[in-house]
Image (cartoon, rainbow, N blue to C red):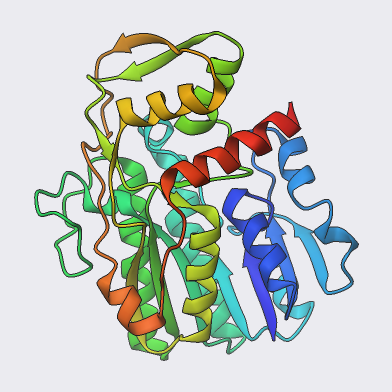
Amino acid sequence: MNILLTGAAGFIGSNLLESLLKEHYVIGVDNFDEFYSKEIKGSNVREAKKNSHFKLLEGDIRDKGFLENCFLARQIDIVVHLAAKAGVRPSILQPEEYYDVNVNGTLQLLETMKNFDVKKLIVASSSSVYGNNKKIPFSEMDSVDFPISPYAASKKAAELLCHTYHHLYLLEITCLRFFTVYGPRQRPDLAIHKFTKAIFNEEEIQMYGDGTSERDYTYIDDIVDGIVKAINNLKGFNIYNLGESRTIKLTEMIELLERIIGKKAKIKNLPEQPGDVARTFADISKARKEIGYSPKFEFEEGLRNFVTWYKKTV
């Protein structure tokens, strides 16, 4: 199968890429956005570039001509769309950029798929679409009409566009709502990576709020497995949560990092940040039943794997 993978050099994309290359030909797309170091993304795909079943194309998904060239490079069977402007807090500072990439970029991709008669699409969405949902755990049947950041709103809008193209042009599309993904190659702006670096360097950790916020942390291998299962069970239009279906308080995460690293964190308490949700917690029963998703990694095991990877990279 020939797969077009957007965001191929990113955290999730590069891990997924290694899995897909075991069985498929992959055309990877990435614009090497300056949100974090291009060198990091380059190292993420260094080994994959040695594989004859991989072709990396650098460009922007908002560029119609570039996208057409991607689809002309090989007969595409399925698109896996991970490319996006990521991050809740930065989206508050750059709402236009986030909307342009995450919504207009997705629209351009859907239009190109329609024009090239490519009918199958997997799209990365986010648990952020649930906002401060009061019902626990979060189900795909819950209302997601109340996002609290431009990033979350852009992901919800992309889901709506996907449903529209499914309805109008019979595209088979699955949207996957990822819950706080962590593990080797995690972006340097994310909490686990930032906190690990700070503890090792004996620098201050900036802890927003009182530390009681909770996240459903999902290990990267479980996310990759969920995406592959979604590819293998793609039909109609569906939305699935991909999480571990358990929550960890911020203070618990910091304490566990301290134990694994063997150093105490220097914590600087700061006010809660606009756009941050109080809790994420995935109901994964639909994904279990319909695509066979079954997360395996306990949080401590995944965190130890991340710290081991981090020590090798510094």
| Image height of 113 relative to 142, above or below | below
Q: Position of residue 39 (x, y in %)?
A: 77, 36
Q: Quadrant of residue 284?
A: bottom left
Return the residue found at the far left: 134
Q: Position of residue 19 (x, y in %)?
A: 67, 68
Rendered residue at 40%/36% (across/down) = 91
Instruction: Return the residue nearer the eye: 129 or 230.
Output: 230
Rendered residue at 21%/46% (across/down) = 131
| Image height of 43 relative to 68, above or below | above
On the question of residue 66 being in view, the answer is no
Rendered residue at 14%/61% (across/down) = 143
On the question of residue 230 being in view, the answer is yes
Q: Position of residue 146 (x, y in %)?
A: 16, 50
Instruction: Return the residue nearer the eye: 82 or 195.
Output: 195
Rendered residue at 52%/87% (across/down) = 119
Name the side, left or right, on which 204 lies relative to 310: left
Instruction: Return the residue nearer the eye: 303 or 151.
Output: 303
Instruction: Specify the quadrant that holds the C terminus.
Output: top right
